[in-house]
Image (spheres, helix red, strand yellow):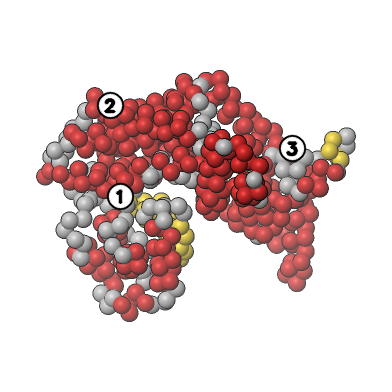
Amino acid sequence: MDLEALAWQIFLLTGPAENILSVTHCMTRLRLVLQHKDAAMITSLGKLPGVLGVHDAGEELQIILGPGRVDKVTSAYEALAAKKGSASAASPEQAGNHIEAERSMPASQTPVIGDGKALHEKIRARNATPIKLLFKRIASIFIPLIPAFIACGLISGLLNVAGKTDPALTQTSLYQLLAIAGNTVFWGMNLFVGYNAAKEFGGTPIIGGILGALISHPALASVQLGSEALVPGRGGVIAVLLVAALQAVLEKCLRRIIPDMFSLFLTPLFTFLLAGTAAICILQPLGGLISDTIGSAATSAIGSGGAITGFILGGAWLPMVMLGIHQTFTPIHAELLSRYGVTILLPVLAMAGGGQVGASLAVYCRTRNHLLKKTIASALPVGIMGVGEPLIYGVTLPLGKPFLGACIGGAFGGAVQASFMVGAATLGISGLPLAAATDQIPIYLLGLVTAYISGFAATWLLGFDDPPEEDRTPDTANE
């Protein structure tokens, strides 16, 4: 389907414009906050050609479109949402748009296998605990940074390959300029994180940004408190998150205390001074301690545990996603990137997606269900590119044993990555595209192939109950 037409179809189902409170997107998903949504809407969205899945995350409705496509669809959708009343003008039967859209679906559109909607609702309800929701909020701080991580990470990864192939290239001006470009996101990370964190916690974003700049300022090295010189950037993103949270609390309190006529200039001044003082004296050292602990724990676990640690992490990643605790790793990845320039956890965890691909391919080879074959055939390409939701919720998890096979594949792939301590200079991508951002591309690819083969073999040996054709019904939650 043409992407503008797809945006229009989504708008017809989620509109009118007055129903749309906010429109954002990440690397693969159009994220909508709507005044009203219902099961009929989600059903119809899941059947649209070009939609890989629909994830009802409570307040937010996430429509999975895939990398690249989501940017264009979001732009077209935002243009439609900006026109108040346009949906009702274009569609007089707007009140019944869910039914009409469903009737207009082509007969060849592949529904998702299994009762994914009921399954996902159980998972979402179980994961909606205060702690897990906090982790989700923290992870959302880094989502807008993912394109920057990808751009800079891919530059750094490809430069690493070029430098190893021909060391003389490292002395050229072009190489050195590109090296600076690849490091840019790390140079400014604290500012970006401070801005996004303040916004997420309810403070003024730019105040969070300048607090991030304050604790990163190179001139801090010339200042001594007591007998010790300050360390610019100490504590990394952990310190920034702490100070941004404090800033939001202080700012809210000050707005209640300071009279309105003085609030415009006194609130930002006192917020910055008070939060900045706490940052330098308390939060930066505390963040440094936490950061050192995280960095040492991650490198020691993989360095000393090697393949065993990789096997455990790679195999446990999919269940962690199901439990909703995978969000805790986002700030850890960011901190490792800030400290070392690479995260050695991402290549290990990315192997879970490779296990999904292998397991789904085994199901494809063994099933006699034509609908299931079509579902896998449509989801495998995006799975190879690192978008695993259609395979997880549409194939392996509903079938049961293939999900276990995928975990086994991820475990063996993770063991390979950890054995060689493969690092990735980015976050936000997985699967085959991640190879270009790693510091050992051949080893990463070896681990990925290992995950494919192991996931395939494990699923083939475990088997599964092949669903009969008549028992399969269209599903709404192929997210």
Name the residue furthest right. Answer: 227
Asked if residue 32 is positioned above or below residue 345 in the image, the reply reads below
Picture disc at residue 230 = none
In the image, taking residue 335 as reference, residue 158 lies left or right, namely: left
Indicate the quadrant where residue 269 lies: bottom right
Q: Is residue 323 visible?
A: no
Q: Amino acid at mark 2?
A: Ala
Picture disc at residue 457 = 2
**At x 73% / y 47%, what residue is drawn?**
216
Q: Position of residue 89 (x, y in %)?
A: 32, 79
Mark-to-mark CA distance, 1 and 3:
45 Å
Q: Which residue is mark 1?
A: 477
Q: How many marks?
A: 3
Q: Is residue 57 visible?
A: yes
Q: Amino acid at mark 3?
A: Pro
Name the residue furthest bottom. Answer: 89
User: In the image, which is nearer the foreground, mark 2 or mark 1?
Assistant: 2
